Amino acid sequence: MSARRPYVRPMTGWWRKNPFFIEYMVHEGTAFFVAAYALILLASVVVLGQGEAAWNRWLEFLMSPLCIIAHVVILLAFLYHSWTWFNIMPRTLPPILINGTRVKAATITYGGLAAAVIASLIVFAIVARLAP
Amino acid sequence: MKRSNAPIFWLLFGAGGMVSALIGPVLVFITGIAAPAGMLLPRELLSYANVLSFSQHWAGKCFLFVIIFLFLWHSAHRIFHTLHDIGLHAGLGAKLVCYGAATTGTLVAGCALLRLGW
């Protein structure tokens, strides 16, 4: 048995002391909502294989106010993820050079957000066309 | 030197992060809010016949698989790397739980989608 009791710096709540790290933890936390949505889709394809009656029960659940409110919360987390993803992208991408000058951070961020808006409109338009 | 497998996980994290940033919000809005509430989209969009035929079409089937697969791996990787920040040792156990869950989910999604037929 060793008599040494080395000091271990406590880890609890360190990030709550600095707004920068609070934001960091919140944007990392969006992963839980992405996982939740993936699991909802996963459950949907599994239930779909169990036949029409099972699907209709699942659909009833999806249409319940509680489930729709949960999706609103998930949507907010996704929107925050989109914003932070493109906000951080200038620092996660290797430097992009055009004619020898580095592309500005704002160009990457707003370019990414514009791409997200366009892609979302295309997806919505396709779904609206598929709709009966 | 043994090659690291880390780039594969980072690639999946990046791909999932990018797809979810681009079209994640609109997908949540369509499947979780607009169609179930009958707002902007009809409720029949999610009827058994409709969803089944979408999932039996090769494009719909591939789309659903890619979305589930990438979203699961993106979140598993992000959660795994954030464990360290809340003081949990991100060792082999945590790796097995995070990536194991993503692998299981991917396999279940793949089997379920294949069983729905074409």
Image (cartoon, coloured by chain):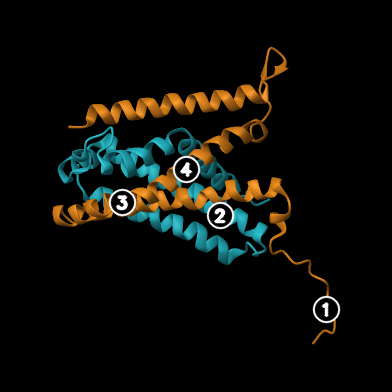
Chain colours: A orange, B cyan
The span from disc 2 to disc 3 (Cα, nearest Å) is 29 Å
Circles 4 and 3 in contact, beta carbons < 8 Å: no
The span from disc 2 to disc 4 (Cα, nearest Å) is 19 Å
- Picture quadrant of residue B23: top left
Label 1 or label 4, whichever lies nearer to me, is 4
User: Taking B48 as reference, is A19 left or right?
Assistant: right
Q: Chain of mark 4?
A: A
* Pointer 2 and pointer 1 on the same chain: no
Give the mark, 1 or 4, whose residue is nearer the N terminus. 1
Quarter of the image that includes the C terminus of chain A: top left
Which residue is at 28% across, 41% downward?
A: B61
SS class of the residue under badge 1?
A: loop
* Amino acid type for the residue under numbered disc 4: Leu
Q: Chain of mark 2?
A: B
Instruction: Quickly name the residue at label 1.
Output: A5
Tell which residue pokes out farthest to the bottom in this image.
Answer: A1
Instruction: Quickly name the residue at label 2.
Output: B79
Instruction: Quickly name the residue at label 3.
Output: A65
x and y percentages locating residue A47 in the rendered image: 24, 55
